[in-house]
């Protein structure tokens, strides 16, 4: 769990991802006249719970933190990971705690039953850490999933997020929501800023995801200044910033 992992990039892996996007869809129509943006943090590093949260809260915004309890109290390539106090503080401040899996395994490499068992283990571990709130939103580790897991998890969560880089507009799949990374150095940050600016002419639901927020980030994280740049672009777009669960409620009201 502590070493960087990259999902397979071979032909079979790519075809599997494409099939997962097509199969077992849970239809969601995202037809907005006013754009929505959600900031999400995966796993999640302590820097996301402190620096990341401070940047959002300074603007009156709240984010969604997908917690993988197997990382709690540890250190890895992202630095120090969240602890029990972070869960309590974020929840009390109005941020959403979302669900990951406990061991953060590649969902395309395990059965749907194994994934569900790992989710249940994660839920139990979060309770043991003192968090007893509802977990309405889920994110697939590495964005990897099978159609069978999508069907099963659709009965447990209001939304499931992947990492296919796009904005949710029109006919979407609540079992595999699209998202845009805030990472990848200056090139990646420029793409994230462009995505936010596109909302001015083409409203949609833009879900950002990131990991660590620190001065020397990993390739899956960003610096505080880079996150500030993306936030400034979101402010300029006029989009409403909501947690994933709140956005799902708002979109559901329009169905």
Image (cartoon, rainbow, N blue to C red):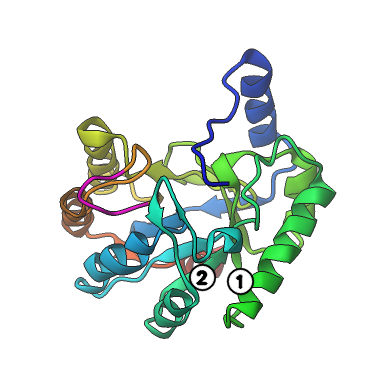
Quadrant the C terminus occupies:
bottom right
Residue 101 on image: x %, y %: 65, 56
Marks 2 & 1, CB-CB < 8 Å contact: yes
Secondary element at image label 1: loop
Residue 214 in the magenta stretch? The answer is yes
Q: Circle 2 sits on which residue?
A: 97
Quickly name the residue at label 1.
135
Q: Residue at x 73, y 64 (%)?
A: 121
Q: Height in image: 70 above or below 2?
A: below
> Which residue occupies the foreground of this view, 73 or 189?
73
Quarter where residue 105 is shown: top right
Q: Is residue 145 above or below residue 229?
A: above
Question: Who's the residue at 54% across and 58% down the image?
Answer: 71
* 121 sits left or right of 234 in the view: right
> How many numbered marks appear?
2
Estimate the x, y position of residue 134 in percent, counting from the top left.
Answer: 61, 77
> What's the residue at 68%, 40% (across, down)?
145
Decide which of tag 2 and tag 1 comes sooner along the chain: 2
Mark 2 Cα within 10 Å, few/some/many (few <14, many 20+)?
many
The magenta region covers 212-217
Q: Secondary structure at mark 2?
A: strand
Callout 1 crowding tier (Cα within 10 Å): few <14, some 14–19, many ≥20 = some
User: Could you give the CA–CA distance between mark 2 and mark 1, rounded to whole angstroms?
Assistant: 6 Å
Q: Mainly helix, strand or loop, the magenta region? A: loop
66 horizontally vs 181: left or right: right
Toward the top, the furthest residue is: 11
């Amino acid at each position: 769990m502590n070493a960087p992992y990259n999902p397979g990039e071979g032909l079979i892996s790519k075809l599997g991802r494409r099939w997962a996007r097509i199969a077992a869809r849970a239809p969601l129509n995202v037809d907005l006249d006013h754009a929505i943006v959600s900031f999400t943090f995966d796993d999640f590093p302590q820097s996301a719970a402190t620096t990341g949260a401070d940047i959002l809260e300074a603007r009156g915004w709240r984010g969604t933190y997908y917690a993988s309890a197997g990382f709690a109290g540890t250190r890895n390539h992202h630095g120090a990971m969240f602890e029990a106090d972070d869960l309590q503080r974020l929840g009390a401040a109005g941020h959403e705690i979302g669900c990951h899996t406990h061991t953060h395994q590649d969902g395309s490499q395990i059965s749907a039953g194994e994934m569900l068992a790992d989710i249940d283990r994660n839920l139990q571990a979060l309770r043991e850490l003192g968090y007893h709130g509802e977990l309405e939103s889920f994110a697939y580790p590495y964005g990897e999933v099978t159609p069978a897991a999508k069907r099963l998890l659709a009965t447990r969560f209001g939304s499931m997020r992947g990492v296919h880089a796009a904005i949710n507009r029109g006919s979407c799949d609540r079992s595999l929501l699209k998202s845009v990374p805030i990472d990848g150095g200056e090139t990646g940050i420029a793409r994230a800023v462009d995505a936010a600016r596109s909302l001015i002419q083409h409203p949609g639901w833009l879900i950002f995801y990131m990991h660590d927020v620190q001065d020397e980030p990993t390739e899956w994280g960003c610096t505080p200044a880079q996150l500030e740049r993306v936030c400034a672009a979101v402010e300029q777009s006029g989009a409403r910033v909501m947690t994933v669960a709140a956005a799902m409620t708002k979109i559901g009201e329009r169905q």
